[in-house]
Structure formats: C-alpha cells, structure tokens
Image (spheres, grey):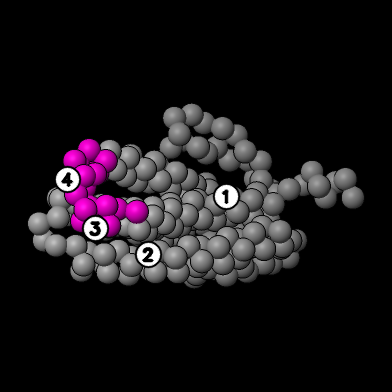
Amino acid sequence: LEPSLGMNVSLDDVGYDRLLSESENMIVQIDLLVVTLQSLRGYYCQISKEHPVRDLQWPSLVSASLLRIAQQLSEISDEFRLVFPHGLFRPGASNITRIIGAVSLFRRFAQVRLSILADVEDRHASYLDLDDIALSGEGARHTPGFRLTLALAVSAMLGVAQGLQNCGRHLERIVESSFPLEEVKCNENYGHTTAIQFGGSGDSNDS
C-alpha cells in the first residue's frame, strides 16, 4: 500500500517513518533467519542419521512456525485487498469500521508469537532430557553451536512476528491521526465494544 491523501487530510509523517523503520528492522531479522537456517542445514548434514537430536524434528517445528507467520500475513493481505481495492492506504476506500478491522488483524501476531514460544519450550525441554545428547561425545560436539544457532533462528522468527505486530500499531496510529473524523464502534473481536474517535482533531485545535 502507498499513502494517498486528499483535501483536508494530513500526512502522519511520524507514523509512516515508524512504519518504514519497522520494515527495515524486519529485513535485518529476515536476513538473520536465512543465515541461521542455512547453518542449521549444515549441522544436520554433519549429524548422523542415528543421532537422537533428529528425533525431535526441529526442522518441522521451524517450518510450522514460519507457516503460522505466513498464513497470518496472507490473511491480512487478503483483507487489505478487499478494504483497499486500489492498493492505496487512504480514507474513503471502505468505511472506517472495515478499515479498523483490517488493521487490527496485525494484533494476532501476538498470539502467533506465543504459540511459537510454547512449541519451542516443549521441544527444548525434550531436547535437554535426551541423555544420549548430554552424555555422548558426539552430542557434546554438536550441542553448543547447534543450540546457539537454533536459538538465533527462533529469535529471528519471533522478531519478524513482533515487527509485523508493530507495523499494525503504526498503521493504527496513521488511521487515528490521518483519516477523517468519525465515531465508530470497534474492537468487537476482543469481546467488547469501544467508541473511538478518529481524525486527531485535538491537536489541531490546540494550534
């Protein structure tokens, strides 16, 4: 999406600056993720087929975690195509309630991060319980570097999910400050209804 403004609609430069900054941070996390996944592939090429670490299926966990992130992002993209059919992030493309609903979908990345952490915690507990890895010479050689690389990969995945969640916050700020003043009811997805006033008129009145 790109910003498209009309008469009496101000550009929220702070919101867009933060959105661009968050995008740059995510690129860094994605680069780290690619490097760590390549390193993990190298570890698995060296580990024997009988090594007990293979039983934990870490590659499957990483793939499933990335799939969760991708599916949530795909769902948001589909909704944005409906709400902003011309690809322009601007008022009037749809009613404000639908716009807020689409932007609020980014909040779901919080749950995505929690689910990834829960899976990693369970798998890592099983990893530490493997006596063969703790006691065997082969396990000792692979464990320190393998665990560090795996931790960096998980951290990068969580960083991407957090970055996407933050992008939603910045988009919410842009909607709040740049879109026309209108009373709407939203947050129905969170089990309650809240009246929110958009347009940022309070700041303009002070000037």
As rendered, which of 115 and 140 lies closer to the eye? Answer: 140
Measured as percent of width and height from the top left, residue 170 is found at 60, 54
The boundaries of the magenta stretch are 126-144
- Identity of the amino acid at label 2? Thr
In this figure, which residue is indicated by the disc labeled 2? 36
- Identity of the amino acid at label 4? Asp
Q: Which mark is residue 129?
A: none
Q: Earlier in the sequence, mark 4 or mark 2?
A: 2
As rendered, which of 121 and 99 lies closer to the eye? Answer: 121
In this figure, which residue is indicated by the disc labeled 3? 59
Query: Residue visible at 43% across and 48% down?
Result: 109
Residue reaching furthest to the front: 137
Q: Is residue 140 magenta?
A: yes
In this figure, which residue is indicated by the disc labeled 1? 169
Query: Residue visible at 83% across and 50% down?
Result: 204
Question: Label 2 vs label 3: CA separation?
Answer: 12 Å
